[in-house]
Amino acid sequence: MVQKKKQPPRGDSVAKTAAAPAEPKRRGRPRAYEPDIALGKALDLFRTTGFAATSLDDLSAATGMNRPSLYGAFGDKRELYIKSYQRYRDNARAVLGEIFRQDWPVRRQLERLFAAVLDLYLSGEEGPHGCFTVMTAGSEAIADPDIRAMVQNALTELDKAFAQCFRRAKEKGELPDGADPVVLAHLASATIHSIAVRARARVPRTELEAIIAGAIDVMLGGR
């Protein structure tokens, strides 16, 4: 008896029986990579440890990005630091600017401003972050002219915002006739800078609030 020859499997059968080649692994940034989120992680790290003490390995671990991805997205460590500081300033400007624009009685406005500052400085999962300008950028400003210009701009911007606040209050009769809005603005800014240092040193919020309350009384002449 003659046996029939078996027909070879058709193309689709061959495809099913043959092992599919493994896809090459992709390198570089992960699919979930978000520049905005990564920059926020870098910002938190720089605020906590400063520029010099933050390594590229630290940044890679915090952002979930390898070094080539970090360089490709943000440049070197200095560029990432500057972008982080700019993000911090943008965030602070948005929060405080909204309060500065309100036409409230000056005491209420100052109380709201300082409360917002405390929320900003005392934030942080591992302890208070403090102020980027005072706690880290101020140190880098000594040797880096670009960062120095950013720090000077941040200080001037805050002084001007407070001065405008006190000018409006004086026009509405909420301040003594002899009150100088510029001097009061410098006093308000200095209070914020002091609060930044104390917050980073983990002084309790209740003590910081007491300092603020006393400073406001001085600025408003007891009114």
Image (cartoon, rainbow, N blue to C red):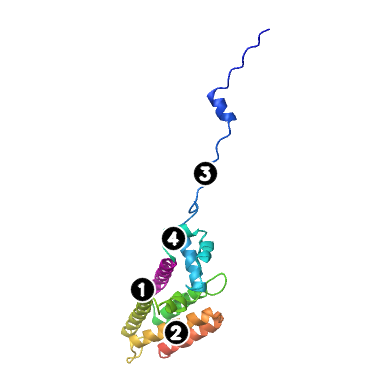
Could you tell me which quadrant the N terminus lies in?
top right
Magenta range is 77-100
Q: Residues within 10 Å of mark 4 (few under 14, many from 20)?
A: some
Tell me the amino acid under the disc marked 1: Asp
Tell me the amino acid under the disc marked 4: Tyr
Q: Residues within 10 Å of mark 3 (few under 14, many from 20)?
A: few
Q: Which residue is mark 4?
A: 71
Of pointers 1 and 2, the one earlier in the residue sequence? 1
On residue 191, which mark appears?
2
On residue 24, which mark appears?
3
Q: Nearer the viewer, mark 4 or mark 1?
A: 4
Give the spatial CA distance, label 3 vs label 1. Answer: 43 Å
On residue 146, which mark appears?
1
Give the spatial CA distance, label 4 vs label 1. Answer: 20 Å
Residue with the most extreme left position? 171
Instruction: Give the quarter of the image for residue 73.
Output: bottom left
Tell me the amino acid under the disc marked 3: Pro
Q: Nearer the viewer, mark 3 or mark 2?
A: 3
Q: Are marks 3 and 4 in contact (CB under 8 Å)?
A: no
Could you tell me which quadrant the C terminus lies in?
bottom left
* Viewer-closest of 77 and 200: 77
Q: Is residue 79 magenta?
A: yes
Give the spatial CA distance, label 3 vs label 2. Answer: 58 Å
- Give the structural element (helix, strand or loop) at label 3: loop
Instruction: Give the quarter of the image for residue 158.
Output: bottom left
Of pointers 3 and 4, the one earlier in the residue sequence? 3
